[in-house]
Amino acid sequence: MSWLDFLKKQTPAMPDASAEPQRLDLPIFPLAAVLFPGGVLSLKVFEQRYLDMSAACMKDGTPFGVCLIASGKEVGQTALPHQIGTLAHIDSGDMPQLGILMLEVRGGRRFRIVSRSTQPDGLLHAQIELLDEPARREVPTAQQGLLPLLQKIAGELGPEKMPKPHAFDDAAWVGYRLTEVLPVQALAKQKLLELDDPVARLEILFTYLSQRKLVL
């Protein structure tokens, strides 16, 4: 059974609709990658629409949204994004040559796209709802076997790829970090990003990895 087939059998937790969500308007950068809260992503920006977007975000100190592409491509005609994405806060930007901007971004809050529009230059803008993260929960005893694997990965990647502080006692942090480093389809990572329950995410990860004898 493939990783994606395995995930399709899982039932995601439904979001809590009791609280009024916070809404924002922001530009969207559709990518062939998934950004997770607390994760880091290196971006090579060269299309004028995204150069302008990045310059405005750096000037104003505001984030943009990163969403996995549902259909289309990163370059050229505006791609259709998945509805759930992550705020991208720019940590640094460098232009090694004219017209090429290298960005380092860090993932913030998850969000859901409510509506979107495409500007004349092809930049996608959206009204988004910020998604609430559940209260901090410890990694359950049943999934503690994930920790040695993640600790080993963190040591191999180093602080540039998995920045400190590490939170091996936080179920959400552990789930996000494991998911972002697994060599699986981006759509499978997207399904795990969309889960609201961090323990459910760990249960899926543990079951899948234990079936492949990667955790005990």
Image (tube, helix red, strand yellow):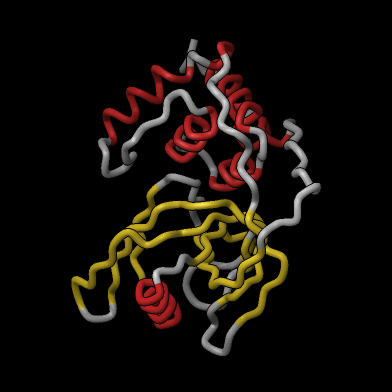
Q: Position of residue 193 (x, y in %)?
A: 59, 43
Q: Quadrant of the N terminus?
A: top right
Report the label total: 0
* Residue at (60, 20) in percent of width and height: 207
Q: Quadrant of residue 97?
A: bottom left
Q: Position of residue 15 (x, y in %)?
A: 75, 44
Residue positioned most to the front: 19
* Residue at (42, 37) in percent of width and height: 181
Vertical arrangement, residue 62 with respect to residue 179, above or below: below
Q: Position of residue 86 (x, y in %)?
A: 54, 55
For this rendering, which residue is in front, 121 or 19? 19
Q: Quadrant of residue 71?
A: bottom right
119 sits left or right of 147 in the view: right
Residue positioned most to the left: 96
140 sits left or right of 83 in the view: left
Residue positioned most to the right: 18
Q: Quadrant of residue 11?
A: top right
Vertical arrangement, residue 93 with respect to residue 78, above or below: above
Q: Position of residue 186 (x, y in %)?
A: 54, 47
For this rendering, which residue is in front, 207 or 167? 167
For this rendering, which residue is in front, 184 or 25? 25
* Residue at (49, 28) in percent of width and height: 170
* Residue at (49, 10) in percent of width and height: 216
